[in-house]
Amino acid sequence: MPSKFEAEDAIEQIVLLEKIQIGLKQSAEGKIVSMDDAKKRLKKWHTEEIEDLIDVIVAESRRDESKRSWDDVKKSLKKQREGR
């Protein structure tokens, strides 16, 4: 780790290492999916997420609130998903 770093960078590294440990544990316990299933899930998720994100961006641009933060956009996206 460099001598100077942002706290956020350290937190991201810790979270990444924790996720890797969880994944290794799940793998050791046999909690895995096939590569084909993983690709199908990712493709479905990716398609839905992209479509939702495009809808949010279009709606936000129509409202002309270009100064909204990314967190606000993600909150709007989450609300839309919950309404399904």
Image (spheres, rainbow, N blue to C red):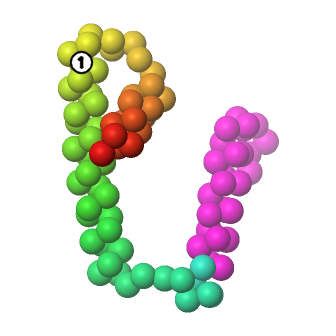
Give the total number of marks visible in the rendering.
1
**Amino acid type, residue under disc 1 in the picture:** Ser
Highlighted range, magenta: 1-25
Q: Quadrant of residue 52?
A: top left
Q: Quadrant of the C terminus?
A: top left
Where residue 12 sits: x, y (%)? 64, 48
Can you give x and y, in whole percent of width and height, for residue 17 in the image?
67, 62
Q: Is residue 73 magenta?
A: no
Q: Is 24 above or below relative to 48?
A: below
Queried whether the magenta region covers residue 7, the answer comes back as: yes
Q: Is residue 64 left or right of residue 81?
A: left
Q: Which residue is mark 1?
A: 61
Q: Is residue 58 above or below residue 33?
A: above
- Chief SS of the magenta region: helix
In depth, the one of 44 and 80 nearer the eye is 80
Q: Is residue 4 visible?
A: yes
Quarter of image, res 59: top left
Quadrant of the rendered structure where residue 70 is?
top left
**Is 32 on the left or on the right of 16, as rendered?**
left
Furthest-front residue in this view:
83
Eyeballing the image, is 7 above or below 21?
A: above
What residue is drawn where x is 71% and y is 54%? 14
Q: Residue at x 62, y 58 (%)?
A: 16
Q: Look at 27% across and 10% down and name the residue there.
A: 64
Query: SS at mark 1?
Result: helix
Q: Position of residue 39 (x, y in %)?
A: 30, 72
Q: Residue at x 21, y 26 (%)?
A: 58
Judged left or right of residue 33, residue 28 is: right
Name above or below for residue 39 compared with residue 9.
Answer: below
